[in-house]
Amino acid sequence: MRKKIVAGNWKMNTTVSEGVALAKAVVEKAGEVGKGVGLIVAPPFTHLVSVAEVLKGSKVALSAQNCADHVKGAYTGEVAVDMLKDAGCSWTILGHSERRQYYGETDEKLVEKVKLALEGGLGVILCVGENLDEREAGRHFDVVKQQVKAVLYNFSAEDMKNIVIAYEPVWAIGTGKTATAAQAEEIHALIRKTLAEKFGAELAEETTILYGGSCKPSNAKELFAEKDIDGGLIGGASLKAEDFIGIALAF
Ligand code: 13P
């Protein structure tokens, strides 16, 4: 049985004190969520140490939203994997569409980041997803398949055990326009097939694939009922503990 996960990407939201309060509220409600569902929160870098303190002893794991593509040194403004580990992270999100779009994150850079994250002992949530033009041109299958191959085909089946994939169609992020369960499922199935072609069917079956893009308590049930959707990467709705936990309760 592959792992079910609901992860909250807080993006560039909340002050440290607001983030600590949000983490406390998530921890308080986390007991309602079944044992089989993993919970992860990904606050901004400045919050990590304080939020780690709140999460201690709870079932909620801590993730960063990004990591540096170097181990250490003269890279002003960057945060290294070692620092994230030491701050209490067990995961990092990588390749979010906002980083690809606004900060020039390339597949080549992502290969380096995934490598460093895994070597440093962090699990990786790798984001993929097509934009609106690509979907309207009917290129969504090709685009997502290429994104998966460009990064993950550089890794081994053993590495894949610490990698989760998040399918986030860019046109559904923060727009209130969720992919239908059927639209999401066909891409999730394609991702799994793409993994199977390189790593074998068994590994592909064991890989957790999350959906992200305007996921909320009211649509999570339908999405999570699909056979290849193993949970969600949640943006806006993860900023309210009740909604975030409400999504995890959809399982
Ligand atoms: P929203 O849930 O706000 O659409 O964001 C999704 C997302 O980008 C999570 O990484």
Image (cartoon, rainbow, N blue to C red):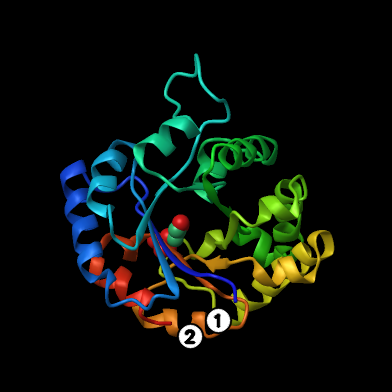
* Residue positioned 62% across, 77% down in the render: 228
- Position above or below: 232 against 154: below
In-front residue for pair 73/212: 73
N-terminal of the pair, mark 1 or mark 2, is: 1
Residue 72: assigned label: none
Locate residue 42, reporting x and y percent: 38, 51
Locate residue 54, reporting x and y percent: 22, 51
Report the image quarter containing ligand 1.
bottom left
Residue identifier under label 2: 222
Task: Name the quadrant of the C terminus.
Answer: bottom left
Q: In screen coordinates, is 197 left or right of 159? A: right
**Extreme-right residue of the structure:** 197
Query: What is the secondary structure assignment of the residue under circle 2?
Result: helix
Locate residue 163, reporting x and y percent: 60, 55
Residue 181: assigned label: 1
- Position above or below: 23 against 89: below
Q: Amino acid at mark 2?
A: Glu
Q: Are marks 1 and 2 in contact (CB under 8 Å)?
A: yes
